[in-house]
Amino acid sequence: MIDSHCHLNDERFDSDRDEVINRAREKGVSLIINIGSGYGFEGNLKSIQIARENAGYIYATVGIHPHDAKLFNNDIERKLRKLIEENRDIIVGIGEIGLDYHYNFSDPVVQQEVFRKMLYLARDYDLPVVIHSREAGDDTFRILGEGKNNLRGVMHCFSGDRDEALRYIEELGFYISISGVVTFKNALKTVEVVKAVPLEWLFAETDSPYLTPAPYRGKRNEPSFVEYVYRKIAEIKEENIENVERIIDSNINRLFSTLTSPE
Ligand code: NI
């Protein structure tokens, strides 16, 4: 099992981060992708540091989250490029980036501008993108389509319906990532997405510390809980869990060019 998306750089892990990482290893999580964006520019530095301390087990992505789009400027862009150039061995993607019209913490026009800048960054360094899209489906799809010849990536915590999911796969070749939301009682739409999307196009993630799956809803989420996402996908697909793990893990390894550590 791989946790393809978490935020171990969140301050909610400051007091017991090493224990959380050890628990993930013990529970059979073979690889973790830690998402750097969403905590200002500094969140990227912390994400890289955590990956450095756990080399070969944790990899990092960097970027500017749509919530932080208003903080972006040329200086931040220069710093991001330098960061990528100096840490090519542990940075495996740009993300999470995209659009969030639910909160609109940054002006939508500014969000779109910064989103495009992040996509240029991904193209310049030949890195995959991790996309956050909330209540912005049409604009996200359109902007990604502008550069479809060179982009590859994943729709993180996918919240659209089955037709949207299939459109991302067929027209952009993007993977669809499923979070703990799929275990919630009211997750009918996400269950339909899992049914409709072939296993070869699915990812699993926790998005921890957010979106804690059942039976731990209400608690802080952590990478070891990714097990419940895999289990639920296997149940919906009526497939055995080993098969589901093998296929999803190879999808994740393929996109991020990572290899599962031998443990
Ligand atoms: Ni996230």
Image (tube, rainbow, N blue to C red):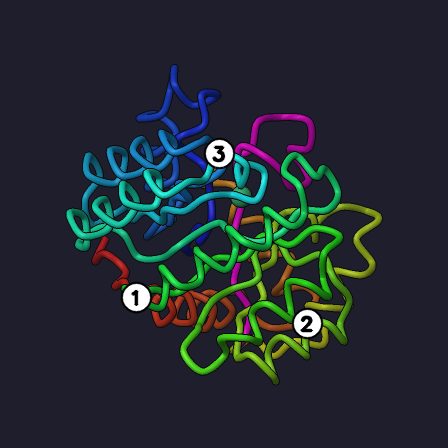
Q: Looking at numbered disc 2 in the image, what kind of residue is underneath it?
A: Ala
Compare marks 3 and 2 and give the one earlier in the sequence: 3
Q: Which residue is mark 2?
A: 165
Mark 1 vs mark 3: which is more N-terminal? 3
CA–CA distance between discs 1 and 2? 27 Å
**Residue at 61% over, 84% down:** 170
Q: Is residue 217 magenta?
A: yes
Label 1 close to label 2 by CB (< 8 Å): no
Picture layout, residue 120 above or below residue 20: below
- Which residue was labeled with disc 1? 124
Whole-percent x and y of residue 34?
Answer: 38, 44
In space, the residues marked 1 and 3 are separated at their CA atoms by 22 Å
**Residue 61 appears left or right of 234:** left
> Which contiguous range is marked in magenta?
201-221
Q: Which residue is mark 3?
A: 71
Q: Is the residue marked 1 within 8 Å of ligand 1, measured from its CB?
A: no
Disc sitting over residue 96 in the figure = none
In the image, residue 35 sits, relative to residue 263, either above or below, namely: above
> Does label 1 or label 2 sit earlier along the sequence?
1
Tag count: 3
| Callout 1 amino acid | Asp
Q: Amino acid at mark 3?
A: Leu
